Image: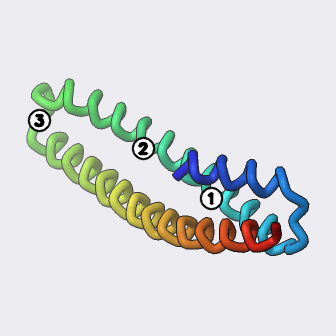
Amino acid sequence: MKDTHAQMKEQVEAKEITDPDLREKLAQHEVLFKKHEAIMMGHEANIEAHESLREGFSKLNLTEMEAQIVEMQEGHNKLMAEHEAMRVEHEQMEKDHSMMLEQIIAQK
């Protein structure tokens, strides 16, 4: 998706676009990509935290283990929700990109 976005951005910048909506839509996509990158960095940090929790898990008492499991489940649920939101946004961006390419080609 990021490659498609970069290609679209190059095509838009290479032409004189008469429709300001195209540039606005591209800017909106850029914001979404930056948001997604930040979310993914948060996911990496969460995974690293899970690894450290797992390493010391056997040394915990039962109450601490249960608390760690709940914490990990909550983290997992958050990751799943964020992935679903990103999937929906990506699908919409792909549709937008197809429409935008058609508009750019039509401007020749």
Amino acid on which disc 3 is placed: Asn
Give 95 or 42, whichever is nearer the viewer: 95
The label nearer to you, 3 versus 2, is: 2
Amino acid on which disc 2 is placed: His
> Callout 1: helix, strand or loop?
helix
Instruction: Return the x and y of residue 14 as percentages of the image width and height.
Output: 83, 51
> Callout 3: helix, strand or loop?
loop
Residue depicted at 85% across the width and 57% down the height: 15
Instruction: Return the x and y of residue 58 as percentages of the image width and height.
Output: 10, 28
Residue depicted at 48% across the width and 68% down the height: 91
Give 7 or 68, whichever is nearer the viewer: 7
Q: Is residue 69 left or right of residue 21?
A: left
Q: Is residue 65 left or right of residue 25?
A: left
Q: Are marks 1 and 2 in contact (CB under 8 Å)?
A: no
Q: Are marks 3 and 2 in contact (CB under 8 Å)?
A: no
| C-alpha distance separating marks 3 and 2 | 27 Å
Q: Which mark is residue 43?
A: 2
Q: Is residue 31 left or right of residue 36?
A: right
The label nearer to you, 1 versus 3, is: 1
Amino acid on which disc 1 is placed: Leu
| C-alpha distance separating marks 1 and 2 | 16 Å
Instruction: Return the x and y of residue 72 as percentages of the image width and height.
Output: 26, 48
Q: Which mark is residue 61?
A: 3
> Callout 2: helix, strand or loop?
helix
Q: Which mark is residue 104?
A: none
Q: Is residue 59 left or right of residue 28?
A: left
Residue depicted at 34% across the width and 37% down the height: 47
Q: Quadrant of the C terminus?
A: bottom right
Query: Eyeballing the image, is 16 above or below 71?
Result: below
Q: Which mark is residue 32?
A: 1
